[in-house]
Image (cartoon, rainbow, N blue to C red):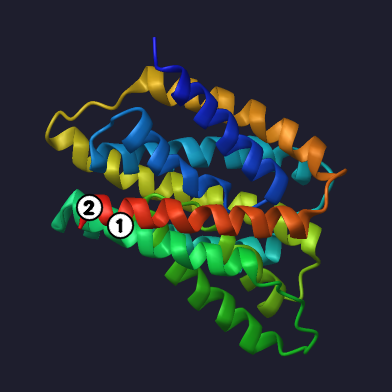
Amino acid sequence: MFDISVWVGAICMGLSLGLLGSGGSILTVPLLVYLAHEPQKIAIAESLLIVGIVALVGSINHILKRKVAFRSVLAFGLPSMASALLGAYASHWVSGQVQLLTFAVIMLAASVFMLKPVSNNQEQQTTRQTLSLLLAGLFVGALAGFVGVGGGFLIVPALLLFANTPMKAAVATSLVIIAMQSFAGFSQYAFEFAKTNTSLNWPLIALVSTFAVAGSFVGMFAAERLPQQHLKKLFGIALIPLSTFIFISNF
């Protein structure tokens, strides 16, 4: 039904998300555009839905184990949902080429975050922390809606720095926030597409979501046995040539 590279790409996307807790979803747009050959804007919308599904499924286990910091979900997630809607709305005023060029820049930023270790900030400044989370949520949500990324590579460091969240709780909380803002951004794309009778590739969405979810479970299992810092560095290095290819192909 689809090229085998799409199946493999979906598994790799899920594996990376399960292994790293962040960053893996940034592979979804390149997968849909360059392997599945989806139109740019449709691929970005489909990416948001797929990322939302994978993040939601991945977060269920964390919620049941009470690893999610729901105060941070409210402080970060609600603003990010609102700005994801705005980012998705703004995307209709620019070309898909501009969105992918922006995506390439964000991918480079993701590689920097992956290569640079982040430690917790232990200062207790509740008001400033809440405001910082709110502003970070607005920024990350706008990016998510505009280019179709989950933004976990930004959310996890923000939770570590501004909310003193332990690493495992930050990863768990990030998945919930990713799901919230991804579904919000997708709803705006779906609304705009409905006006023009633009159809999404639902079989492709189902295929990628299924294999990505399966891959994420394998990744989460393997993450308990592999050195995560080394994996993050390898993933960060791999993003550099991929982002360069996307930038050159859309310039």
Q: Position of residue 26 (x, y in %)?
A: 48, 49
Is residue 229 visible in the rendered image? The answer is yes
Q: Is residue 122 left or right of residue 192?
A: right
Observer-nearest residue: 188 or 2?
Answer: 2
Quarter the N terminus occupies? top left
Is residue 173 visible in the rendered image? The answer is no
Q: Residues within 10 Å of mark 2 (few under 14, many from 20)?
A: few
Q: Amino acid at mark 1?
A: Phe
Q: Residues within 10 Å of mark 1 (few under 14, many from 20)?
A: some
Q: CA distance from mark 2 to mark 1?
A: 5 Å
Q: Residue at x 20, y 49 (%)?
A: 96
Q: Is residue 10 left or right of residue 119?
A: left
Quarter the C terminus occupies? bottom left
Observer-nearest residue: 184 or 152?
Answer: 152
Instruction: Determine the residue located farthest toward the top in the rendered image.
Output: 1
* Residue 121 to residue 219: above or below: below
Q: Position of residue 3 (x, y in %)?
A: 40, 17
Q: Residue at x 37, y 43 (%)?
A: 186
Quarter of the image for residue 162 reads: bottom right
Q: Position of residue 216 (x, y in %)?
A: 67, 35
Instruction: Determine the residue located farthest toward the right in the rendered image.
Output: 225
Q: Position of residue 111 (x, y in %)?
A: 54, 63
Say the numbered circle drawn on residue 247. 1
Q: Does dot 1 land on a helix, a strand or a loop?
A: helix
Q: Are marks 2 and 1 in contact (CB under 8 Å)?
A: yes
Q: Is residue 77 left or right of residue 216?
A: left
* Residue 225 to residue 93: above or below: above
Q: Amino acid at mark 2?
A: Asn
Q: Which residue is mark 2?
A: 250
Quarter of the image for residue 132 reads: bottom right
